[in-house]
Amino acid sequence: MDMARGPRLKTQLDETAARFTASVFFDWRLLPFDVKGSIAHVTMLAEQQIIANDDAKTIIAGLNQVLEEWQTGRLSPHLEWEDVHMNVEGRLNEIIGPVSGMLHTARSRNDQVALDMHLYMLEVGSRLKAGLHALIAAMVQRAVEDLDVIIPGYTHMQAAQPILLSHHWMAYKSMFVRDYDRLEQWYDRTSCSPLGAGALSGTPYPTNPERTRELLGLKRVYDNSIDAVSDRDFLMEFLSWASLTGIHMSRLAEELVLWSSQEFGYIRIADEYSTGSSIMPQKRNPDVAELTRGKAGRVIGRMQGLLTTMKGLPLAYDSDMQEDKEAVFDVVDTMISLLTVVPPMLTTLRVNRERILRRLGNDYTAATDLADLLVTKGMTFREAHHLVGRLVSLLEAAGKGFQDVDAKWLKDVVPEIRPEWLKHLSPSDLVEKRTQPMATATSRVREQIEEAQSWLMRHNDFGGENFSP
Ligand code: ARG
């Protein structure tokens, strides 16, 4: 049976054209959602007396069998049935016979595929929320464990001012919480039913789109049938969300790569998340972190692909839109794999406290604070900035840090600066002076951590720690 050809098309579709146009080999994962949508549709058709109750029962039983065959791997895709929707109907016809022909009353594949994608994305959305929750929990766990560690903070990749390592981790926490908010807002907008739009104009049957919405547990029905079948905003928005979240993970991954290098040596990524080199036995490659960085590029590429596909399309449905599937599915799989592997890589890494301590004593990240102190002694900030700059170049030339300065030497070279002023410039002095909200003092970071812990509790309705791919 060739459901979509009919008498208008006399010959069979060319085999290469069939392969070219078919989506069944990649939209197969939509089958449970397709069946769910069809059951709601048929239920509504019977309630509205568009089809008989007995026929609806037969169709629903048949659909459940198709689903069961799919779940147990006994169903295989047929090329001649083109896509998952016609595969379901084709198999249904084999099971229940001609009654199956009533399923597609008052419906088009255009509103059907749009519905399937909404239902699929909502399920994916819940899993991704759980994954993000796990990632945020991992960030907070790191912040709790590393609260005693001070690192140089960087601007322009130059050591700038000392900060708590936990403060740095918590910056990522804040980024991921925004990603979570965006995902929730997207989720709400995506909970919208296009069913009832038909091909584009609605249908002449007395259907009840509000009832199918209710049966499917969606929040709203599209208010315009043309928009309902041509809208892919929810997919483009999803890809934008994934790109942004991917970029955040990628920036974090880049720091892990850098910090685990011999040059930095701040952290050691666990063996479980490091690979060896096939030629250089000394190496521990941060592959997981590198691929986290790499996959963000892939996700952004997929987003650009779909944006470009959509940009010139006239309303309503066009076959170009079938290209949404591979892009979105690939990004879904990529995001799930990222959210599976990144949190445990974070919680298992080790911070090399000794190495960081040695590194900390060796820079001039106290320079701003020294200048600030000179201001309290009556200099202008510009004068102070200049004097401290001079002191730093002298120290640098002598291979010394602020802590190595002796009073006599200082008196000879920069007499304006008194030796006792250099006393309270240790990294922890500097950190603990920054006590305003959002700043790096331990008390403030601890507050951020407590707030984040309570956020995690409040958002645990997706069972964050139970996230599984
Ligand atoms: N396989 C199609 C897609 O993924 C389903 C919709 C086809 N509609 C149509 N009128 N050809 O977009």
Image (cartoon, helix red, strand yellow):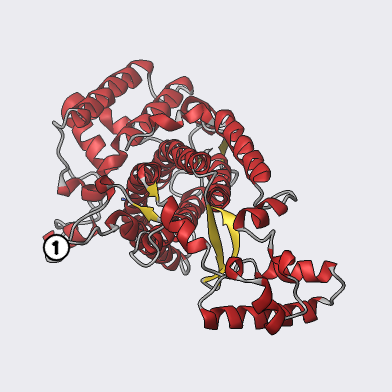
The x and y percentages for residue 8 are 25, 55
Residue 306 vertical placement versus 364 (above, below)? above
Q: Quadrant of the N terminus?
A: top left
The x and y percentages for residue 51 are 39, 24
Quarter-wise, where is residue 259 in the image? Answer: bottom left
- Residue for point 48% across, 56% down: 357
Q: Which residue is mark 1?
A: 16
Residue 24 visible to the viewer: yes
- Residue for point 64% across, 66% down: 366
Q: Is residue 370 left or right of residue 77?
A: right
Q: Is residue 83 left or right of residue 316?
A: left
The x and y percentages for residue 395 are 58, 78
Quarter-wise, where is residue 153 in the image? Answer: bottom right
The x and y percentages for residue 213 are 51, 31
Which residue in the rendered view is the most extreme toward the front? 408
Residue 319 visible to the viewer: no
Q: Is residue 111 left or right of residue 414?
A: left
Q: Nearer the viewer, residue 76 or 196?
A: 76
- Residue for point 58% across, 69% down: 404
Instruction: Count the marks.
Output: 1
Residue 122 vertical placement versus 319 (above, below)? above
Residue 354 vertical placement versus 156 (above, below)? above
Quarter-wise, where is residue 90 in the image? Answer: top left
Q: Amino acid at mark 1?
A: Thr
Label 1: which secondary element: helix
Q: Nearer the viewer, residue 221 or 396?
A: 396
